Image: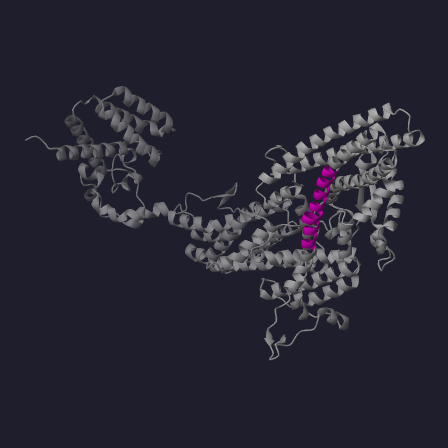
Amino acid sequence: MEPNGHQIGENVRIMEQNFRTCVLHMIPSSIDENHSKQLIQDLYYSIKTSSKDSVSKVLEYYRKLLIRNSNDIESWKHLEMFAGIMCQLSSPEEKEKYLMQCLSLIDKSYQSDEREGVFLRPDIMSSQRKSNGSVYAESFENFEKISDRRSIMSYGGNVWQATSSDTTLKSLSDPYFSTMVPKTDIIQSIPYLLLGTPSTLFELKDKTYYIPSNIPNGESQQLHNIIEAGLLYLNLRIKVELLKKSAVSGTLKVSFLTFIESRLREYNLFVNKFSSHLHPSDPLCFVYQHICPEILKLRTCLSYVELLDKLRGEQLLTIFQSQKRNGDPILEKFSSDAFAYLSQSYFEKLCNWVLSGRLDADNSDFFVQKTKSTEELDFTFIREKIPTFIPSSCARKIYIIGKSLRFLEIYCNELEWVGNLSNKYAVQYQLLDLSTIDQRFIDIINQQYEEINVRVNEVLKSKFYYFETIELLKDILLMGKSDFIYAIIQSSKSLFNQPSQLLESHYLTRCLQVAVQQSSMRNRLNKSDHNTLINRLDARLLELAHGSSGWDVFTLDYLIDQPLSSVININQHGSRREYLRIFNFLWRIKRNGYLYEQEWQRNSSLMKLFRKLNSRLPFLKDLLNRMSMINVLKNQIQSFTKKIEIYCFENIIDKEYSQLITNLHQKESDNIKSMKVKVLKNGVKVSSGILKPDLRYLKSLKEITADDMNDISSYDIEDLQRIHSTFLANILQHPLLYSGTGAAIGTYTNQLYPTSLVLLMDMSYDYIRNYSELNNILHEICIQLNLDPNQHLYDSIGRFNTVSKKLIEQWKDFENECNAYIKDLKSDQSTELNKLSRVLH
């Protein structure tokens, strides 16, 4: 009967087991498990293919790799002879027969105990119950599988029955344990291991402990667990020292390192105390049981120390705050202690800021930081550095409180008030438990914030004329007082017509003084401000350009000092430029409007003189007709200029200024609570409750209390600055004036609206200059006719015709450009610009 597949597979498996057993008894004892396993596998497959070259290469490779001394050479020769014979046998039956003969010899060697040093080794005895895949014992987790496996030696005879029954376990184990390290020596080394220091028994190199080989495996495993504490302690000490030497930035990080050092000292004290009570007979499991909580603490410390380079100081605070309710008792205790330790310096810094407006030298962990500027109020508020346990709105109020204190103390000279406020709230903060942020802390911050804002607004309005300054900026730099601007032009027109190189500032200052006296600005003289407001007015010249006239380089300025410059940021970088841009644009319009008015009055006087002359002169009627036509054209250009002027002042400047004033009063009016009203029988409406007295009346009687503050809400200094900046930005972002990114471009002109408008203003200016020249020619003709009505005026008439034709051409160009501009406005999506196009048409 032919053998089936199952029988063939079983025979192959048995032959592979027999081969492995034979080879195991022949290889030198110095070869470790992994190399033994790989050698048997490679040699088996080489012999299986009957390839002599392959077998020779395998044996040569492993001989060079594994054979190190002369004692192993004899065993290796037995293996080479065995492999050579196996390779010469061609059929599986012959190979199986030879393997059985070898196994019988091995069985006899057990019985006679004559060749134990060559074929039988203790590690082979321990492998008798191993599976096919490994010649070493498996882990205890798989112990239950042993019952399903056969002994490798079962096919070579019953070895266990051949063993003498007279041998005791003690006689077998005594030679082994006699070389082991005494347990007392291990216990004596425990304090050294726990503190990460070397001892006579345990060598320490490169932060690694070396456990002697003559320590039993059970104790060795327990020592691995115990040694973890010492290595954690050692690594923590080294890392803390390195971080301190690397100059860690931030007081919170430095405080955290100090906190870790205190934890290491506590651990050191624990080890000393524990070692003094440690008995030589105590088992290692007893040691590990007592140090296990300390290991967990050290692990926690090390995990945070390793993250120190990646975290900012306030992030550490945030993490510790969030881990205070983690659920892990050890982590909760560590986080609570760390937060309490670190928060001391943090809240000390916070209180120092809200009570005096001062920062420490190192405030990199704080969300308020001083910039590199020399300005006293140049602080920046960094939202990314706000700990999560402080609400962002509360953090901003903290920032404003400190900044406002410095503002009042340095710029407003309110030293006494600031001192009283600091003393008042210092007592309240001392009564708080600052180990956590609760609602009481937030309430005190809100109260202090409102109280200091009320004081800031009161000082700015009553002591530094805040609203009056805002109004003057509008009247002067935004030309809200037209009579004042015309008075300047009237008193300085001779200077404006000169080349810019000939102008000097002191002449302009004198003209300003005259303009103030001749306009409504004189009403601001000799008031309660002692002329402080009007004395801030100044005139200056822009950067001179070749060929420029006084009209091109003149500008007004209004000088504002602290504390107003902090909230009306006219003197800060970029803000003066905004006022200058608006003024220069409006100056073109005012200049043209003034010149048109002056030349029209002059032309009207000349026309009256011509009409009084003899109308029978042949050219006089033609001259008057032509002049009338030119005046019609001039009136059209003048009308366009006037409409643009009215629109800019009414729909842009006045509108935004009204919104500015409304915004400045909005917060106070919004805070007034609506009262309940009831209607009497006669129809009169009265309050149904008790009305609180007016705050101004309370101020006249006493200092406003904290309860009164509940009904007061004022803008802080940054709100005031923001409102004023928004006012300027809204003016400049109007489509007629905005030329920045995303500005509207005309559909027909393909130009920005401000560019087209400036071009039209320049064309209007050129027209009125030629119109002025025409008036000069008319004046010459009028004089000549009065002197001699019969004289020939060919030259004057020729110049008159030339200039008049030029004016007509200029009007045509202006008309074309104006129509295109109106079409741009009409096609724009803005309803407001569509209305303007209809007004200009």
Q: Is residue 617 left or right of residue 33?
A: right
Residue at point 20%, 31% (across, down): 102
Viewer-closest of 229 and 362? 362
Q: Is residue 639 magenta?
A: yes
Task: Answer above or below: position of 839 versus 352.
Answer: above
Q: State which quadrant residue 101 falls in.
A: top left
Q: Is residue 21 left or right of residue 705?
A: left
Q: State which quadrant residue 658 falls in.
A: bottom right
Q: Position of residue 696 (x, y in %)?
A: 74, 69
Task: Answer above or below: position of 706 versus 557.
Answer: below
Viewer-closest of 479 and 313? 479
Q: Position of residue 141 (x, y in %)?
A: 30, 48
Q: Is residue 376 visible?
A: no
Viewer-closest of 636 and 717? 636
Residue at point 86%, 53% (across, down): 522
Residue at point 35%, 30% (across, down): 71
Q: Is residue 121 visible?
A: yes
Q: State which quadrant residue 264 falls in.
A: bottom right
Extreme-right residue of the structure? 787
Q: Position of residue 466 (x, y in %)?
A: 76, 56
Extreme-left residue of the structure? 1
Magenta region: which residues? 635-660
Q: Position of residue 701 (x, y in %)?
A: 76, 73
